[in-house]
Structures are given as C-alpha cells and as structure tokens.
Image (tube, rainbow, N blue to C red):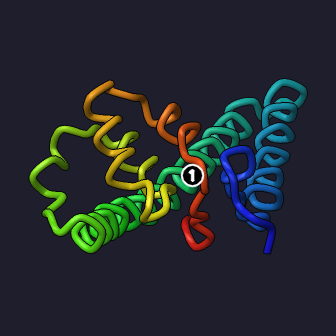
Amino acid sequence: MKTQSYKNHIRFYPPHHFVYYPVVMAFISISIYFAFTTEDTLLWSFISAIFVVLFCLAFMLRQHYALTLQNRLVRLELRYRYLATTGQRFEEIEDKFDDSQLFALRFAPDEELAALADIALKDNLTGDTIKKAIVNWKGDYERV
C-alpha cells in the first residue's frame, strides 16, 4: 500500500465514483436529450428528474451514514491517543476545536499529537494548516 501523505490522502471508491456516477450521469444526459428532441417531452422530463433525484440521493446517503460513524470513531480515537500520550483527558479541550481541526489531528502521530493540539488551540490553526504542519504523517488507510 502506498504511504499516505497530505498530497494523496483523499480516497475514491472506484465502483461508486467511476462506474455508478458516470452511468447515472449518462442516463441523465440521454433523458434530457430525449426530453428536447422527441414529442414525449413531459415523459422524458419526468424520467430526467427521477435520474437527478437518484444521483443526489445516492451521493447523500452513501456519504452521510459512513461519515457520521467515521467522525464518531475519529473523536474516540483522538480521546484515547491523547489520554495515552499525555495522561490528560482530551474531552477537556475537545470542544475548543472545530470539526476540521479535530479531523486533521487524526493524521498526527502520537509523538506530535499533544504539541500540535496545543499549537492549533493557541494559534487557531485551520484543519488544512494542521495537516501541513504534521512532520511524520500517520496514514488513515481505513477511512471512508
């Protein structure tokens, strides 16, 4: 498996991103074409609308369930790692971070986590800035 870093940490699911979406987009395009070029404009407009709804629903549902669970697990992991490395509870400072900051901290190795969390709080670093500040990137190879 390729070593993960800031530049390659975005992940795609090929069957979904490169098969399902292109097929649905093709069906949307074809149905819109027929809506404008045939006498059954109302029927093809309705079919086009159905494909648009299917496209949006698939995207929203796939992401929503997986990301909700993943966000919960990231928070739990950060709490555990922070307690294990500092002996202090992360919950005491967790509410001071926004989601992007918390989710960026998951890529910090144990040796950098506490110091980077302190700097992020003190300087109010963005999630992207936190990711760029990580020296030894800890890959998250099992995320959604």
- List x then y, in percent, for residue 100: 40, 40
- List x then y, in percent, for residue 33: 86, 31
Q: On the image, which quarter does residue 99 sit in?
A: top left
Image side of residue 79 versus residue 68, left or right: left
Examine the rendered structure and indicate whether residue 108 appears above or below residue 41.
below
Image side of residue 41 versus residue 128, left or right: right
For the point 36% across and 59% down, the residue is 71
Image side of residue 142 versus residue 99, left or right: right
Examine the rendered structure and indicate whether residue 10 appears above or below residue 119.
below
Q: Amino acid at mark 1?
A: Phe
For the point 23% across and 64% down, the residue is 86
**Count of marks, rendered view:** 1
Examine the rendered structure and indicate whether residue 59 appears above or below residue 37.
below
For the point 27% across and 69% down, the residue is 76
Examine the rendered structure and indicate whether residue 76 appears above or below residue 22.
below
- List x then y, in percent, for residue 65: 41, 64
Image side of residue 34 versus residue 60, left or right: right
Q: Element type at marker 1? A: helix
Quadrant, the C terminus: bottom right
- List x then y, in percent, for residue 57: 52, 52
For the point 14% across and 63% down, the residue is 88
Foreground residue among 2 and 84:
84
Residue beneath disc 1: 59
Quadrant, the N terminus: bottom right
